Amino acid sequence: MKFKKKYIAAGSAVILSLSLCVYALNQHSQQANTDKNRVSYVNGNKDTKKTENLTPDQVSQKEGI
């Protein structure tokens, strides 16, 4: 009877320690993958070329069609 209690306690300790190791490894792999999901934004400091509001006839004339 004493041996059964020792085996149960040892088995529980092994299962608990293995589950904690798996949890820690899973957390580490998730932190490494967060850099791949980031979005890089473009700074709006550069002057952009303004668009012209032209009619279709004016565009055709400008392009030489």
Image (tube, rainbow, N blue to C red):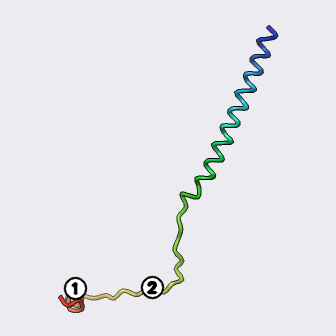
- Label 1: state its secondary structure: helix
Say which element carries label 2.
loop
* Residue sitting at x 70%, y 27%: 15
Q: Nearer the viewer, mark 2 or mark 1?
A: 2
- Residue 17, given in percent of the width and then of the height, sits at 73, 32
Q: Amino acid at mark 2?
A: Thr
Which residue type does callout 1 highlight?
Pro
x 58%, y 58%: residue: 35
Q: Would you say 10 lies left or right of 65 here?
A: right
**Percent position (x, y) of residue 52?**
33, 88
Dot 1: few (<14), some (14–19), or many (≥20) neighbours within 10 Å? few
The residue at which mark 2 appears reads as 48
In the foreground, 33 or 44: 33
**Picture coordinates of residue 34 (x, y %)?**
59, 55
Furthest residue toward right:
2
**Where is residue 50 shown, x and y percent of the image?**
40, 87
Q: Please, which residue is most extreme toward the top here?
A: 1
Q: Quadrant of residue 64?
A: bottom left
User: In terms of sequence position, does the residue under pointer 2 or pointer 1 come before the other?
Assistant: 2
> On the image, numbered disc 1 is attached to which residue?
56
Badge 2: few (under 14), some or many (20 or more) residues near its Cα, within 10 Å?
A: few
**Lateral position of residue 42 relative to residue 17, left or right:** left
**Residue appearing at x 17%, y 88% in the figure:** 65
